[in-house]
Image (cartoon, rainbow, N blue to C red):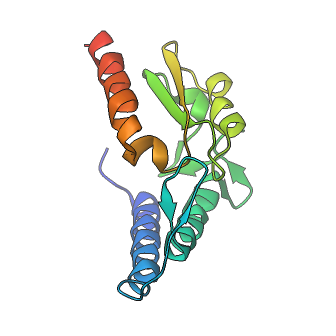
Amino acid sequence: MPPTHDLRKYMEFAAETVYLAGRLTLGYFGTGVRPDFKADDTPVTVADRLAEQRQFTLADTLVWSKGQHVIKGGFSIGGQEVALKNVTCPILNIYALQDHLVPPDASRALKDRTGSADYTELAFPGGHIGIYVSGKAQKEVTPAIGNWLNDRS
């Protein structure tokens, strides 16, 4: 299906959100901002936190739009309902056990809301970013993703 005007609106909003988040972080580039360290020892700066907050605006908009809801139904793009219950492809849900932005309970809630018969959850110690960029993540998360994909090919 070619993109409709309705879909382009969301794509443009997503691009603008990412652009503005990037502009926020560039404002701190080269200023000597020192990072804090999360519980999993991954660095985070004030610029990172501001960019994350801006990007959550996108998530909020996609989940709630004019009283429509992706999980409960009634949300549509291009005249087609967008609902998690309609997702039937294999799903790999990876989440961090110490994530303060997307708590583990919020990630685990996905399981009972999709139409997938092949649903897998993988939980790893670490924070929101740390489970993907830390050295430990490279040794554990990346191979787990590869194994999951291999099992389905």
In the image, taking residue 120 as reference, residue 75 lies left or right, namely: right
Q: Quadrant of the C terminus?
A: top left
Instruction: Say which residue appears at 32% left-offset and 10% top-offset.
Output: 151
Residue 92 lies, in percent from the top left, at: 46, 26
Between 50 and 10, which is closer to the camera in this rendering?
50
In the image, taking residue 64 as reference, residue 149 lies left or right, namely: left
Residue 119 lies, in percent from the top left, at: 52, 18
Q: Is residue 143 above or below residue 125?
A: above
Instruction: Say which residue appears at 46% left-offset and 41% top-offset.
Output: 131
Q: Quadrant of the N terminus?
A: top left
Between 49 and 73, which is closer to the camera in this rendering?
49
The number of numbered discs placed on residues in the rendered structure image is 0
Between 93 and 35, which is closer to the camera in this rendering?
35
Residue 59: name its quadrant. Answer: bottom right
Q: Is residue 82 above or below residue 20?
A: above
Residue 141 lies, in percent from the top left, at: 39, 31
Instruction: Say which residue appears at 42% left-offset and 87% top-offset.
Output: 27
Instruction: Say which residue appears at 55% left-offset and 46% top-offset.
Output: 40
Q: Is residue 5 above or below residue 152?
A: below
Residue 19: name its quadrant. Answer: bottom left
In the image, taking residue 143 as reference, residue 99 lies left or right, namely: right
Residue 38 lies, in percent from the top left, at: 58, 55
Residue 106: name its quadrant. Answer: top right
